[in-house]
Structures are given as C-alpha cells and as structure tokens.
Amino acid sequence: MKRFRNILVALDTRSTTHPALDWALSVAVPSKARLTLVDVLPDLSWIARNVVPHSEAHQQLMLDDKQQKLEELAEPIRKLGLDVTTKVLRGKTSRALCDEVFHADHDLLVRVTRGTNSRSSAFYGTTGSRLMRNSPCALALIHPNYAASSGRIVAAIDPARNNSAHYKMTREVLDLTKSLAELQQKEMHVVHAWVLFTPTLLKSTFSANDLANFRKSSEADIAKEVDEVLEPFGLSHRDRRVHLIEGKIEAGDSVAKFADEENVEMIVLGTMARSGIAGALIGNTAERVLELAKCSLLTIKPDAFISPESAADDDTQTGS
C-alpha cells in the first residue's frame, strides 16, 4: 500500500481555514508521516525596497508573524504524536516550494487549488499549474471546500500495455487511489477515457457497418486492457465503479466532464507524456484535466521525471 512519509504542506497563514492541512492530516495521521508546514514570503520588488521605509525590518516582522502562526497550527498536531516542522520560505511561491521539495526530499506537496490572491481565473491558478508541471514529487491540489466533499476518489488511467513505463504509472495511480480510499474511508472509482482513432478519417474511409464493427472491436480491446490492469485490485470493466468513456476530442476533456457530472472529490492521475523531454511535458490528458477540472487533484510523476526547477539549480551549481 502506498504511504507518504515526508509531506510538505503549503499554507497561507492569513487565511482562517486550511483545507490543505485538513486533507494532509487525513493522510499523515494514520501513517504517522512527518509534516513540514510552510508559508511563502515574497521578496519585495526593487521599487518597494526603495519606497518603503525600513523595508527589511518590515519584511522581518512579516516573516516572524508567519512563523508564529505556523507554530500555532503545528502545536495541536504535535499533540497527536506527529513530527511537525514549520518554516517560512522566501521568494516566488512555485520556485520556493519546488526548492524545498528538492532539498528536503519530500514525497508529497499539498496546497489549495488556488491562492486567495491569485491573478489567474483558472481553477488551479498560476502557481498550481506551475507546481503540477515542475514539482519533483507528488502534488495534491485541494479544493477550498474539501470538508464538504462527496467522498469519491477517481483514478484516471490509461493502461497502454505496449508502453512499460506508462503501464507502471497506471498501476501506481491505482495503488495510490486504493490507499487513499482506505485511509480516508472514501469510495474508489476508476475512469478510462478513450477516443476512436481519427474518427473523421474513418467515416470517410469505411462504411457505417465497418465503422460499427471497428468501434466494437476497439471497445473489446480496451475492456481487455483495463481488466488486465484492474485484476490485482479486484475490479473489472463490468464493476459499477469502473467507467469506460468514449470521448470526441481529448481523453482529458472526458475525464474532467465525468468528474464534474459525478461530483467527484478528487482525481488521481499520472503526469507522463508519451514522448518529449523529461520535465517538459506532463501529457495531453493531464494538461486538459488541469485546464478543465474543478475538483481536488492529485498527480504523481514518473521515476525518470526531472523537474525544470531542480535542473536549473544543478545548472547553476555546475556553472553550465
């Protein structure tokens, strides 16, 4: 069973509620994971440094205030027997969090879907999108209304038996979803969205009868692939919790629509592109889910993933 052991929780200490921390505790308490609670203090712009009197002292006061509030949040958690560290990071939020993950070897980063001061209209915000692409570890973006969620966690999968790395990622997504469902006493569902290969071309090439037969054959092959990967989890495509959806454009569109219509609490998926430079792409399905979904999202990276943020650190250190 997948268990996280070293969890980084990004908080905004100005807020009165902390759904990201509530969710992280639901994972950390049963498994006795170590927690690090952080807030990020942005650096002052050069204009602010020149205009604001005693700007450094002002920054220090803000840092001390954030540190105190983090400690206030940490103290009752320590009484539960968990190891909790608090820290105020400095700089750009996404970069500061990725640096902390990289240097402290965290295996999970948890944050709300979008900060209260986000300038983006997207549900996951600019920072959330950057973290999904750049975080060196698994990332959980938690809906602000997490406490009122439905209790249904969905594994978005693509078996891809002809791609061993992709197949391995699918098994990891299922294992993680199963673990979360057990830890949090939620209901596990599985969704596989697929698009019939070049349907426009097929319609112009094949008769209606041939096209129907092709679709039927494709559905049978997909069901067989799904059953193979689900068998260790005691599921098959015939189970009410397994959903095979034929989409019209992109698989990610179908996954996001399903999550919206079924009031899904969280989608779990891998961010593996079928091709491309490590760290440069997260895969078409993940990209579309990131753009369209409006629920909590947990993404995991492949073993070979190299964060552009950590790569930049290495380049700086080596002088390349």
Image (cartoon, helix red, strand yellow):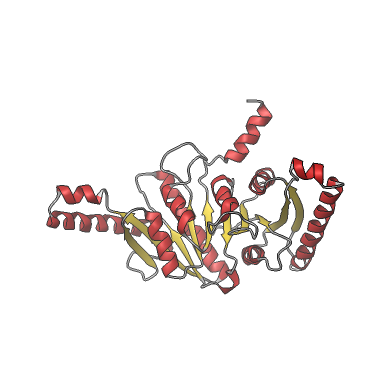
Residue 10 placement (x, y as % from top left): 67, 56
- Nearer to me, 62 or 36: 62
- Nearer to me, 28 or 216: 216
Q: How many marks?
A: 0
Residue 159 placement (x, y as % from top left): 38, 52
Residue at position x 76%, y 63% in the image: 74
Image quadrant where one finds the N terminus: bottom right
Residue at position x 60%, y 72% in the image: 147
Residue 237's place in the image compared with 315, above or below, is below
Is any part of residue 232 visible from this angle? no
* Location of residue 195 by image quarter: bottom left
Q: 127 left or right of 266?
A: right
Residue at position x 77%, y 45% in the image: 48
Q: 49 left or right of 113?
A: right
Q: 52 left or right of 298?
A: right
Residue at position x 57%, y 41% in the image: 307
Image quadrant where one finds the C terminus: top right
Is any part of residue 67 visible from this angle? yes
Residue 255 placement (x, y as % from top left): 41, 60
Residue 72's place in the image compared with 278, above or below, is below
Residue 231's place in the image compared with 186, above or below, is above
**View extreme (top): residue:** 320
Residue 318 placement (x, y as % from top left): 66, 27
